[in-house]
Every structure is written in structure tokens, then in C-alpha cells.
Image: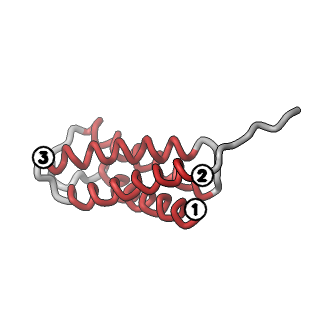
């Protein structure tokens, strides 16, 4: 299960790194500035979530799943509008989200400790 967790984190980090430069250069697709900044902020959130997943933080799994789902939705929109890089975004987002869901389903449930 550790390998699946690491692979989900790596796919999330790579996708997030691709999102980071959107605020400065949207690749000529003509995004409004606030939307481009949201893409970049999603990249930052994805990196934070992936690092949390690597450190086995309790909040990280839902965060990685949420970031993957938003990236996947953005990739589908990009594919529909024929944006450059949409296929790469689709593959990376689907891989990260799929691996995160597999890891979330297979990991043992946390049992709260009695005080």
C-alpha cells in the first residue's frame, strides 16, 4: 500500500507543478486572470496535499482526492476546448485520483485511542 500512496503523491505533485505557472503564463489559452490564479493556487494546494500524504497526515487523503477531482474536471474542460496539454492533465489527474481512491479504500481504518 505504501507504493500506491507514493505513486498517488507523485502524480499529484507532477500535476500540481504543471498548474503552478498558469498565473504568469496561461499558454495562450486566454484564461481570465482570476481563473489563472485559481489554477496556480490549486497547484500549491496539490503540493501541500501530496506532501501531507507522503507524511501520512490524516487530512491528506481527502485533500489529494479533492485536488485530483478538480484537476480531472479542469482537464475534461480543457479537452473539450482543445487546450494544449489537456491530455497530459487528464492522464495525470486520472492516475493521481485513481491511485488515491485505491489507497483510501485499501488502507486500514484508524481507531481512536481511548484517553
Tell me if residue 32 comes above or below residue 52 in the rendering: above
From the image, tell me which residue sits under label 2.
107
> What is the quadrant of the N terminus in the image?
bottom right
Between discs 3 and 1, the one toward the N terminus: 1
* CA separation in Å, label 3 and label 1: 34 Å
Where residue 62 sits in the image (x, y, percent)?
51, 41
| Residue in view at x 47 percent, y 59 percent | 8
Task: Classify residue 32 as left or right of residue 64.
Answer: left
> What is the quadrant of the C terminus in the image?
top right
Task: Classify residue 57 as left or right of residue 21.
Answer: right
| Residue in view at x 35 percent, y 42 percent | 70
Q: Residues within 10 Å of mark 3 (few under 14, many from 20)?
A: few
Q: Circles 3 and 1: CB distance less than 8 Å?
A: no
Between discs 2 and 1, the one toward the N terminus: 1
Total marks in image? 3
Outermost residue, right side: 115
> Circle 2 — which element?
loop
Where residue 12 sits in the image (x, y, percent)?
43, 56
Q: Residues within 10 Å of mark 2 (few under 14, many from 20)?
A: few
| Residue in view at x 42 percent, y 61 percent | 11
Q: Circles 2 and 1: CB distance less than 8 Å?
A: yes
| Residue in view at x 44 percent, y 57 percent | 99
Where residue 108 sits in the image (x, y, percent)?
64, 49
> Circle 1 — which element?
loop
- Mark linked to residue 80: 3
> Circle 3 — which element?
helix
From the image, tell me which residue sits under label 1.
1
* CA separation in Å, label 3 and label 2: 35 Å
Where residue 47 sits in the image (x, y, percent)?
49, 53
Amino acid at each position: 500500500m505504501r507504493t500506491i500512496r507514493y505513486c498517488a503523491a507523485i502524480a499529484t505533485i507532477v500535476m500540481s507543478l504543471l498548474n503552478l505557472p498558469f498565473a504568469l503564463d496561461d499558454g495562450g489559452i486566454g484564461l481570465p486572470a482570476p481563473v489563472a490564479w485559481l489554477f496556480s493556487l490549486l497547484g500549491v494546494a496539490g503540493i501541500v496535499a501530496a506532501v501531507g500524504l507522503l507524511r501520512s497526515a490524516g487530512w491528506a487523503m481527502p485533500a489529494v482526492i479533492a485536488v485530483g477531482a478538480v484537476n480531472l474536471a479542469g482537464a475534461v474542460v480543457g479537452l473539450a476546448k482543445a487546450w494544449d496539454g489537456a491530455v497530459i492533465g487528464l492522464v495525470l489527474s486520472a492516475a493521481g485520483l485513481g491511485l488515491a481512491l485505491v489507497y483510501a479504500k485499501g488502507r486500514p481504518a484508524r481507531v481512536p485511542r481511548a484517553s
